[in-house]
Each structure stands twice: as structure tokens, then as C-alpha cells.
Amino acid sequence: MELIKNSKIDFVGKRYIAFAISGVLSLLGIIAIIQIGLGYANMGVDFAGGTLVEVGFDKPVNMAEIRGILSAKGMNDVELQEVGDTGRILIRTRKSDIGNLTAKISTIFKERFKTDNSFKIERTEEVGPKIGTELKEKALWAIFWAIIALTVYITFRFKQPRFGIGAAVATLHDVLVVTGIFWVCNREINLLLITALLTLAGYSLTDTVVVFDRIRENLKLRRKEAYDVIINSSINEILSRTIVTSITVLIVLIALLVKGSQVTTDFCWILIFGVIIGTYSSIFIASPILIEWNSLMMKKSSKVVTASEKIGRQSTAPPSR
């Protein structure tokens, strides 16, 4: 399926505009990560600490109904998670008061369900700030090592470091931009966000590899053409496939966003932004980096040749009298 036939868009000619836009958005992402690291963000229970209560019901419950019941009693800041179809739910809150919280939840549910659906407090845990800090550090390290691993993999696969660097920069760009957007929107920063970012990194890499494969193929077949011309035509050749793939993924994510539970809402939004930004970065960031790298190498080679010629002229010049 070819959405755009015989595309001849000058992508590489617009790379500096893209670099400027991406630079601003990436800077926002860096600021967001610094703020998250310092705790100046909407941190979830996983990172900020708090209390977890697991409740088991005899019959499956409606999560929207549970959320409404708790909100009506002033518990608006809780996180809810359904454990399969077993009628068990996890309730997380930033308040570190297990005794009072457990008693309050029991009272609310007894008042609402009475004998319709009996329940039992299965488990209560308190997550201290220290544990939250450790989780936050491990999450950031997980993203860091994932990008390093991606760089090494792409470098070995394409047998040239320029491809590895291009893929790493594009992936890091996507993670930073999405993180910055969520920080600005004051969305909750939790382990689900980290999971979504790692998923996004994998998708971004796959999208970039598809473009890089076509570039590598054309570099072998069209050696006499200019490097930037080959890069640009390769992007145009793969453009329809890239767009169709992205649209397909977006349709699935939008369906999950509409029909899924509230727990997966942020996860879906992260991936929706990620797919759009990942498609953009594979075209305007990863591929143009190959051009910049090639230009840098050619300048270095030119300087070496010039220096060699200068030394050669000096050695062959007749001695002065």
C-alpha cells in the first residue's frame, strides 16, 4: 500500500529547522528529568512513597464504580489497579497512614456493598520515601542502559558507528520529548511511565532501523550519487511504509485508549505521542545525523590530505642558498 507515490520531499534540506525544534523540545525533556530527579514533579506512590492496600472481593467489581465511591468520600488522589478478573484491586495513595487508611476503606466499602459483595483487606504495605528514591534511580538507569544497548546493537548490525549514534540520538530524543510533554501536563510520574518509555524506545528503534536498512542498501547500489541525495531519496522511498505502520499502531492505541481502563490511559497517551515523535525523529533526526557525520569525516579527511600535500611540497622543495 503506497499512500504517497513518487514522493520527492526535500527532508534533508529542512534538517536544521528540525534540529532547532528538537533541540528546544529535548531541552524541555532534560529540565523535566532534572525536576523529576529532584522530586519537583507529580510523583506517584512508586517514587514518592505512600501506602498500598489490596482488597479482595467475592465478585468482580467495576473499577469506574470503585473510583466514584472513593472520590465521593474525598479520596480523589488514589491510584486504582485491577488484578486480573479475580475481583481483587490495588489501592495506592501517597498518605503514609496504614491504620487510618485501611479503616476508612473498610468503612466506605461496607457502607456501599453491605451484603451484595463481601470483601476482605488482603494486604497492606507502606512504601517509604527511601524506597521511592531507589526506584526512581533504578528507573533512570534502566532507560540509560537501554539506550546504550541499542547503540551497541545498531553499531554491530550496520557495522558503522554513525548508524549507532544516529539511532541512539533519535531514541534519546523521543524519550526526552515525551517526558517533557508529560511533565508540562503535570501527569503522574510512576513505574507505568517508565514501562511506556522503554516500550517507546523499542518502537522508535524499529522505525529507525527500517529507514537505515533502505539507506544502507542504496549506499551500496548508488555509489556515484551524493551522500545527502541518497539519504533523502531513501527516506522518500520508505515514507509510505513508515506512515502506514504508524497509522496502524495509532489505531490500536486509540482503540485501547477509548475502550481500556483508566489505568492504561497515560500508557496509551505516552505511546501515541511516542509513535508520532518516533516517526518524525527517524526521518528528521536519525537520518540527517548520518549526513552530518559524513560531512565531518570528509572535512577531517580533507585536512589530512592537505597537510600531507604541504609536507610533500616542503620535502621536494630545493634547499635555499
Image (tube, rainbow, N blue to C red):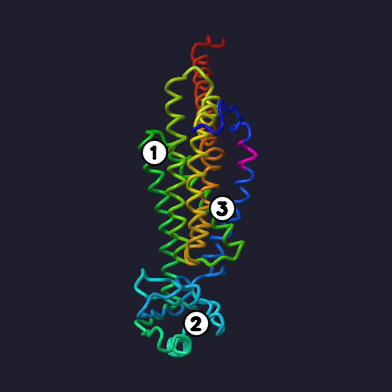
Q: Secondary structure at mark 3?
A: helix
Q: Main secondary structure of the magenta part?
A: helix
* Residue that carries the numbered disc 1 in the rendered image: 155
Dot 2 alpha-carbon crowd within 10 angstroms: few under 14, some 14 to 19, many 20 or more: some
The percent position of residue 159, horizontal first and vertical second, equals 37, 33
* Residue that carries the numbered disc 3 in the rendered image: 177
Q: Secondary structure at mark 1?
A: helix
Q: Are marks 3 and 1 in contact (CB under 8 Å)?
A: no
Residue 64 is one of the magenta-drawn residues: no
* Residue that carries the numbered disc 2 in the rendered image: 95
Q: Nearer the viewer, mark 1 or mark 2?
A: 2
Q: Earlier in the sequence, mark 3 or mark 2?
A: 2
CA separation in Å, label 1 and label 2: 47 Å
Q: For residue 113, which quarter of the picture?
A: bottom left
CA separation in Å, label 3 and label 2: 31 Å
Q: Residue at 61% of width from left, 61% of height from top?
A: 184
